[in-house]
Amino acid sequence: MDINAHRPVFGEGFSMMDALHSCRRTVPSLEYYDKLLLAIAGSLAFGLAIGVATSVALEVGLAGGAVFATLFVYDAMFRNPPLPTTGARAAVLVWHVFVIVAIATAIL
């Protein structure tokens, strides 16, 4: 049995609330850190748009967007940092090996 068989088609009693409810079922909800990443990218894009669309220099617009994005980075790193998972020790080891190899490659 089709669960949408009882629903009217467009124009026959279809409301905006029906459209919203169907979108909520199909679009996954964003987690907190996903929203922070979007806010960081949006801040930089807004700074770029200010630099392109106004008399403000492009570099100044980008710098303003970067300063605003820093607030979101601060929040993600210091106010609400992600909690370590069970594999945190392995991640720390891999990170330090990566840093040492990158430095050794740059020096040699």
Image (cartoon, grey):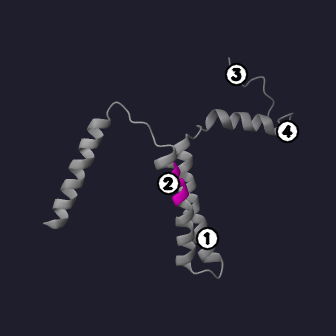
Residue 75 drawn at (x, y percent): 53, 50
Query: Which disc number belongs to residue 11?
Result: 4
Q: What whole-number distance in Å separates the C-alpha atoms at marks 3 and 1? A: 45 Å
- Residue farthest toward the top in the current orientation of the protein: 1
Q: Label 4: state its secondary structure.
A: loop
Q: Label 1: state its secondary structure.
A: helix
Relative to 2, is 22 above or below?
Answer: below
Query: Which disc number belongs to residue 3?
Result: 3
Q: Quadrant of residue 68?
A: bottom right
Frontmost of labels 4 and 2 is 2
Are circles 2 and 1 on residues that touch, CB within 8 Å? no
Q: Label 3: state its secondary structure.
A: loop
Q: Residue at point 56% right, 52% down?
A: 38
Instruction: First in sequence, mark 3 or 1: give its number.
Output: 3
Check disc 1: other Cα within 10 Å, few if <14, some if 14-19, many if 20+. Answer: some
Q: Start and end of the magenta stretch?
A: 70-75
Instruction: First in sequence, mark 4 or 2: give its number.
Output: 4
Q: Residue at point 57% right, 41% down?
A: 30
Check disc 3: other Cα within 10 Å, few if <14, some if 14-19, many if 20+. Answer: few
Are circles 4 and 2 on residues that touch, CB within 8 Å? no
Q: Nearer the viewer, residue 55 or 77?
A: 77
Are circles 3 and 1 on residues that touch, CB within 8 Å? no
Q: What whole-number distance in Å separates the C-alpha atoms at marks 3 and 4? A: 19 Å
> What amino acid is labelled 2 in the image?
Val
Check disc 2: other Cα within 10 Å, few if <14, some if 14-19, many if 20+. Answer: some
Q: Residue at point 82% right, 35% down?
A: 14
Residue 97 drawn at (x, y percent): 21, 48
